[in-house]
Amino acid sequence: MNTLLLSFLLTLVSTLTTLDEQKALSEWTPAAVVSDESIMAYGIDSCFKAYPINDAIFARMDGKSFKKNCTMPRSSLRYLRVLHRNVEGKTQLGEIVCNQSIAADLLDIFRKLYEANYKIERIILIDNYNADDETSMRANNTSCFNFRVVSGTTKLSKHSQGLAIDINPLYNPYIHLNNGKVEPATGKPYAYNRANLRNVKVPIIDAHDLCYRLFIQHGFRWGGAWRTVKDYQHFEK
């Protein structure tokens, strides 16, 4: 293959890749990987925005995170577009449904985490996992709104109001201190001796972690500081 033909083919591949990325950005395809160049062309501010829940988004939620008995008004929820760095350091498109009252907080926090190259494995709606918390956590998926009760109780969770978010939950599990049960079950290796954990793909959330500091600065409470349970993934307001 001659040099001119190789150069042409490389340019063509680059152009097609850029077009694919621009389409992913304009349509906001969750979990799509995009380059810094495409983000610059699209506009970084457009990558951190809040929107009312439109019919297309609600169709994904209806009967899943937004259950038939949901008491949370759809009008009080917002759909957020955010960027994040995945475990390989590449930029992915993320999405969050949250309470409108914390939308600005989350946009600021996730933008700062992105700018600091903080790694979050994935951020897609929990509806992609049929709103099943255990399945979503095992996938290390960061999520917010889900109309459900607190694990092991009949009390509605803050997630039911879209006022709580779980970050990298596989590596930052929920621990029932009364019986030692860990959620997700696959998170048990990361439940104890957390200061000595090695070979994890994302930062461990503790009181020195950037994620922790940003959420606390914005007035959130951290589940890792609770006494009756430890919920290292969890921040609520």
Image (spheres, helix red, strand yellow):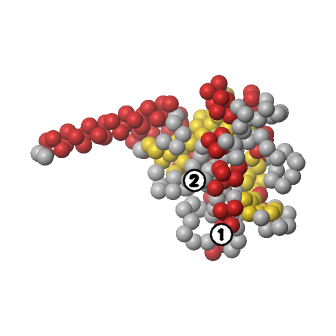
Which residue lies under the disc numbered 2? 120
Quadrant hosting residue 138 = bottom right
Task: In the rendered view, tell whether residue 102 sits above or below residue 230.
Answer: above
Looking at the image, which residue is at 25% across and 39% down? Answer: 11
Q: Position of residue 233 (x, y in %)?
A: 70, 57
Task: Tell me the kind of residue under disc 2.
Answer: Ile
| Residue at screen point 65% across, 62% down | 186
Q: Position of residue 141 (x, y in %)?
A: 62, 50
Mark sitting earlier along the chain (2/1): 2
Front label number (2 vs 1):
1
Q: Nearer the viewer, residue 112 or 154?
A: 154
Label 2 residue SS? loop
Q: Secondary structure at mark 1?
A: helix
Residue drawn at 42 percent across, 34 percent down: 22
Q: Are marks 2 and 1 in contact (CB under 8 Å)?
A: no
Q: Is residue 8 left or right of residue 186?
A: left
Residue 206 sits above or below residue 66 on the image? below
Q: Position of residue 5 (x, y in %)?
A: 15, 41
**Residue 217 visible to an observer of this rendering:** no
Which of the labelled discs sits on residue 91, or is there none? Answer: none
Q: Give the quadrant of residue 204.
A: bottom right
How many neighbours does mark 2 have within 10 angstroms: few (below 14), some (14-19), or many (20 or more)?
Answer: many
- For residue 189, the mark is 1
Q: Residues within 10 Å of mark 1 (few under 14, many from 20)?
A: some
What residue is at 60 percent from the left and 40 percent from the top? 95
Where residue 27 sits in the image (x, y, percent)?
Answer: 50, 30
Q: Is there any visible trace of residue 79 in the rendered image?
A: yes
